[in-house]
Amino acid sequence: MSELLDVFIGESRENLESASQELLAIQSSGPASERVDKIFRDLHTIKGSSDLFDIKPLTRLAHAAEDLLDSVRANEVAFSDDIGDLLLEALDQISIWFDELEVGSQDLEQWQPISVNLGAQLRHFIDPNGLDSPGNENNAAHNDLTSSDDKALTDEQRDMLAAFSDNADLKLLSQVEGPFCYHIKYTPDEGCFFRGEDPINVALALPGLKAFNIDMPELNHDADIYNCVTNIEALGCADADAIKQHMAYYEGQYSLTVFTSHALRASCVDKIKDNVALIADQTLSDALKENDLEQVHASAGLLLASQDVSDASFDDAKRAVLKCLSTAGELDFLNRDAQANESGSEDTHIDKDSTAFSAESTSTDSTAGKLGDDSPQEAGGNSPHASVLCGKTLAPHEKAILTQQLTLLNSDSYKSEFMFPSIAGLVGNILGENFSDEDAVAVAICNALDDETIKEQADEVQKQQSAEETSVEASQTEHTAESAEAVSDTKPLSSAEDNAQPVKTERQAVKMLKVDQAKIDYLMDIVGELTVAKNSLPYLAKQAEEEGGSRKLSKQIKAHFSIVNRLTESLQSAVLQIRMVPVSHVFQRYPRLVRDLARKLDKKIELCMQGEDTEFDKNLIESLSEPLIHLLRNSIDHGIESPSERIAAGKSEMGRIDLIATPLDDSVIIEIRDDGKGIDPQKIKLLAFQKGVISEAQLESLDDNEALQLIFAAGFSTSEQVSDLSGRGVGMDAVKTMVSQAGGTIEMHSEVGVGTTFKLLLPQTMSVNRVMMFEVNDQMFGVGMDAVVETVKVPTSDIQRIRNEQVLVIREKLIPLCNLRDALGFEDAEEKEEHSILVVATPQGEFGLIIDKFHEGIDVIQKPLEGVLAGYAHFSGTALLGDGRVLLIINVQEVLAQCL
Amino acid sequence: MPIAFKKKVAVMTGHCEIEEAESLFAWLNEEVSRQVNLKALVSAHTAVYQVLLAKKPKVSVWPESEKLIWLTKMMNNKSNVWCE
């Protein structure tokens, strides 16, 4: 996957996330314009950025959603839950596509119908009666399309089609699909073969290609075969964007003209009528006169089928006309043209308009490469053509679009590389110009919008800015005065220019840095090594004292150690801090989950989250996400009752699930609490017995709390009916495994009728472990500090024996003992008067480990056992000590299981 | 070899890369009566198409591939090709 795509997916996911959060917020607390704005911006960014890649369906869908939001923003469409649901669905779809993109399994062919379908649904909200035109590219074009039904092609365009072939217009019309058609003249450079270009195959792969012509001069015997002399002309149906994208590598070698299918149709009206007259079929003519669509379809189809191909009187034109008529969606256009022709003045106006549209496409494409230099000039208001156009033909909706683009340009979230192409394209479509930089766009928009409010806005920003500037430097005051003058002269041109500048500088200030996680992990590893290296200093000091006999040197080393120690510790915590992310990172996905599931199950559930800013190691948090989803699903599916049951039980109709994260020392407690029906321990016990999880004796002896913990047993499911949400019998057992893999524990409390609480205790970070070192048979071992309860030294006489097991009573508590010498296979030690006992906590209770000698606690980076050692379960890992020795870390549970 | 040059006919098979264009051009130039067999031709580089379209040699077998219908039409002096 390319780096760019990586960045795009990463950023777009954030946009998706924030958009869906806002959508949920709107659904729960009603629409607010700033929320809609936020969603709009998010989608706009996704759409704009996605255009960089060959993922048209995604771009289209994002676009449709953006358009819908735009209408909502403009209060043209009222926000409803249906719209919200559909938008969420669209966001989900985009997210699914991102998943596919990430693993590279995308199939655009499959995406297409989904995109078309969802896009049409979205657009249906904008205009319930509107024609469903999924191929439709952007706002401006869309509006142009609907308002240009009657516009015909320009003379140039007609000539172009005529030059292509006789009746090219009719033939193209007979095959037309989608709202736009194009004509492309592709003249590859002579040397293009040397750049690896393959013009004919490029042309053959043009989207929506309908016809093409290859112009080839005669080749002399001594001609250089590696000179490309091919010229290609092609006609087809696709919008300008698609063609531009396809021809992106051949910039400057082609000229493109795009016109609407409606314009094409309007231009063909006369020809169609003439040909219908020539065909002279009574049924067809009558049907046309009566505007009977079905009859026209039928008779044209019949004529088409019955024609004799070799019949000279049935030329291409007639065939094309029949084909058009047999598939026409409506016939009104035939009559509409007649009206348009009658009102001559209007006709010319329309013609001009459509020239503008097509001229824009042509210039954008054919000259994009060369225009870079002079376009700002043109945009700067020097082009009379542009200003005339803007002044006269801006419709209210176009103004609105321009205003939005200007706002976007000036917004904080503006990202030049992603958003500029889309903004420039949109503005370009409306104004009929093209732009090479943001300033030019801003200037052009301001020029075009001869609207007082816009100017006021600009002036306001300008004033703020000049106020700032005056305070900065005296030398700049002149400049400010100049620009202030400009404002007073109400020259939007210069004010906009000045506007654009500060926005740019602001953007350059990078606040956040995105770093590949692997780099942080690497840094973490180095810090780990540093910790180990640091730990060697005390040994060195000891050595200096004992062997070198220099106390002074030893003291100095120790002093240095304390400095290095402090620095390493702060370095370590700094790196750990980088890896820390707030739990909201994971939590924020849940409101959506809860809402969707609740709707699916017809329950009313409110999710309350607390402590979202509690921080967690990034890796841990990712591994947490799954178990939490499981638990939430369980609460929703099995915990919370249906509204009617709740009312019957005297509870409020709305169920409540609390998701609470609380930091506790180096750990975090995550609680999931529901106020549902709770879990009945008796039922659990019985079920567990039926499933063979417990024996009959256990059935009698287990207390309620122990019974509840049975749900964590493998292969246990409480739901009698397996639903698609949860209750597959793997849930809780899997949750427990995942949590303990992350180094945490899970507890559950439940009260029938009151609710259930799951409590997850998780370490805040998993990278550095503090272990307690001790000695057995002259060898060093370690045990995780969190397992250590206390260390005691007891006289041998205090150790008692019960049934051949050694036990110790500490503060009236009976603690079973385990001699580590036995457990680790060492020889028994000589009788000692006193024993060192390490008391450790395990899920089964407290145990005492008899060891030889206690040592200090130490921070280590624990490494898993590898190779031949991997099979030894009684060690959980190894760590490197400062003096180079390897410390084996004991897996207390395994050792105890062996020993007792 | 995508192009097998026989006595009178050059048999083109599969996809013909740009390198083939030179040998094909030279071979066709050697004698006017030489023909090409396009039966198994599927696609070719523009340079190869360029030789075929500019020289318009006699074709012994037209391409079977539907993708090359345009080539057939164009070599038969059709000025433009409509995809249907």
Image (cartoon, grey):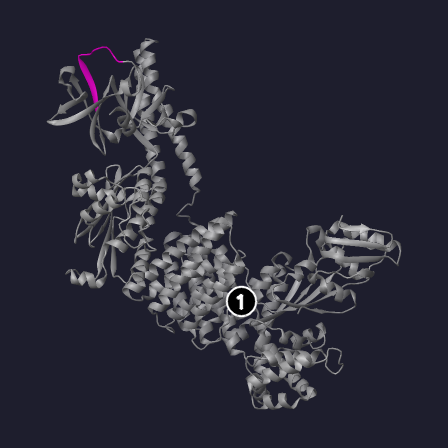
Can you identify the residue that label 1 sits on? A428
Residue A771: percent from the left, percent from the top? 29, 27
* Above-or-below relation of A221 to A391: above
**Residue A573 sits in quarter:** top left
Q: Is residue A800 left or right of residue A378?
A: left
Residue A467 visible in this rendered orientation of the protein? no
**Residue A503 sits in quarter:** bottom left
Residue at figure coordinates x 71%, y 50% from the top left: A194
Q: Nearer the viewer, residue A643 or A794?
A: A643
Residue A446: percent from the left, percent from the top? 47, 68
* Above-or-below relation of A383 to A890: below
Q: Which residues are magenta?
A: A828-838
Residue at figure coordinates x 66%, y 75% from the top left: A171
**Residue A815 sits in quarter:** top left
Disc 1 crowd, CA 10 A, few/some/many (<14, 14-19, 20+): many
The answer to whether residue A274 is magenta is: no
Q: Nearer the viewer, residue A36 or A510?
A: A36
Residue B3: percent from the left, percent from the top? 78, 51
Task: Count how many numbered circles sit on residues in the image.
Answer: 1
For label 1, the SS is: helix
Q: Is residue B7 left or right of residue A383?
A: right
Q: Name the residue type under label 1.
A: Gly
* Above-or-below relation of A548 to A694: above
Q: Nearer the viewer, residue A554 or B23?
A: B23
Label 1: chain letter: A
Q: Quadrant of the C terminus of chain A?
A: top left
Residue at figure coordinates x 30%, y 62% from the top left: A599
Q: Is residue A121 left or right of residue A758?
A: right
Residue A346: percent from the left, percent from the top? 56, 85
Residue A141 visible in this rendered orientation of the protein? yes
